[in-house]
Amino acid sequence: MNRILQSLITFALLAACKPVPIPEPPSGPPEVKLPAHYEWVKVDAAEQLIASTPDLQIMDVRSDPEIKNGDGWLKGARWASYLHDNRRFLEVWEKDKPWLVYCALGPRSELTAADMAALGYKKVYLLEGGFNAWMAAHKPVQK
């Protein structure tokens, strides 16, 4: 009798429970809000920035296979893959110098720039279209 009563109580409790809705997955990458002094630059402007800014630091946030199996990287770029915890690099690199950040297309550089803003980086440029746009414009690379 005890088992029957316990089963009835469990059934009643389960029947009274409302199903918990399953949240919809995001439709794309998270929205990123960058400081006003962070800016996207086109390939030609990035090339001019590199030539005219002696203390400009360049960060490549593509993955290791993208670099090793790809077409190279921008001369002087430091590698800090977004996919391999680049925050450890961001915490110790020069925050007062200007930075040009790029990935293959742009989204990872934008997410990296958001981390840079949170860490107090002063001036960050993001390469519009990423390394793919750089290559499409036939700009120089290092291998």
Image (cartoon, rainbow, N blue to C red):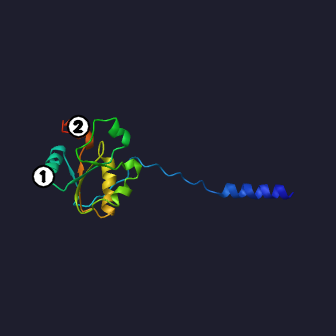
Residue at 40%, 52% (x, y): give it: 85
Left or right of residue 52, residue 13 in this image: right
Q: Residue 46, position in %: x, y?
A: 18, 48
Q: Nearer the viewer, mark 2 or mark 1?
A: 1
Label 2 SS:
helix
Residue 107, compared with residue 65, is above or below; it is below
Q: Nearer the viewer, residue 142 or 50?
A: 142
Q: Residue 24, position in %: x, y?
A: 47, 49
Q: Amino acid at mark 1?
A: Ser
Q: Are marks 2 and 1 in contact (CB under 8 Å)?
A: no
2 or 1: tag closer to the N-terminus: 1
Q: Residue 97, position in %: x, y?
A: 22, 60
Can you identify the residue that label 1 sits on?
A: 52
Label 1 SS:
helix
Can you identify the residue that label 2 sits on?
A: 135
Q: Amino acid at mark 2?
A: Met
Q: Residue 16 sits in which quadrant?
A: bottom right
Q: Nearer the viewer, residue 64 or 129?
A: 64
Left or right of residue 52, residue 21 in this image: right
Residue at 28%, 35% (x, y): give it: 71
Q: Quadrant of the N terminus?
A: bottom right
